[in-house]
Amino acid sequence: MARFDYTSRDIVEFAAEGGAPDALLELGLLYASGREAAQDFVTAHKWFNLAALRGNAEARRYRQELSREMTKAQVAKAQKLAREWLSRH
């Protein structure tokens, strides 16, 4: 019998591929906190942005808070990554 070692991040990333706002928010939280992934504010902002675009109010709040900790260049990169993700999904 095959054994699969999926982390909760793997499961959330799979769910996020479908654009589920709660899954997108959870990925943002994983990257913002450094839980099960290296802390990465640019990637966190990307996921918060995508969740917010899908109507998640909590993601809007986290995105706004995180933006205060980031440079303009980092925010621009996160927005670019979000647009690229949208173009593929």
Image (cartoon, rainbow, N blue to C red):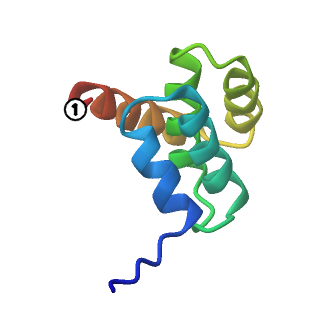
**Residue identifier under label 1:** 88
Please report the residue visible at 73 percent of the width from the left and 57 percent of the height from the top: 33
Give left or right: position of 3 versus 63: left
Image position of 80 (left or right of 73): left
Is the N terminus in the top left, top right, bottom left or bottom right quadrant? bottom left
- Residue at 22% from the left image edge and 32% from the top image edge: 88
Expressed as whole percent of the image width and height from the top left, the position of residue 13 reads 45, 50
Most foreground residue, 64 or 69? 64
Q: Is residue 50 left or right of residue 14?
A: right
Q: Residue at x 41, y 77 (%)?
A: 4
Question: Extreme front residue here?
Answer: 1
- Mark 1: few/some/many CA within 10 Å (<14, 14-19, 20+): few
Which secondary structure lies at badge 1? helix
Q: Nearer the viewer, residue 57 or 8?
A: 8
**Which amino acid type is shown beneath numbered disc 1?**
Arg
Q: How many marks?
A: 1
Q: Position of residue 66 (x, y in %)?
A: 71, 38
Which percent across, then down, holds residue 11?
Answer: 49, 55
Vertical arrangement, residue 60 with respect to residue 63, above or below: above
Between 86 and 22, the one lying in front of the other is 22
Which is more toward the observer, 55 or 60? 55
Which percent across, then down, holds residue 81? 37, 38
Q: Is residue 64 above or below residue 43?
A: above
Q: Quarter holding the C terminus?
A: top left
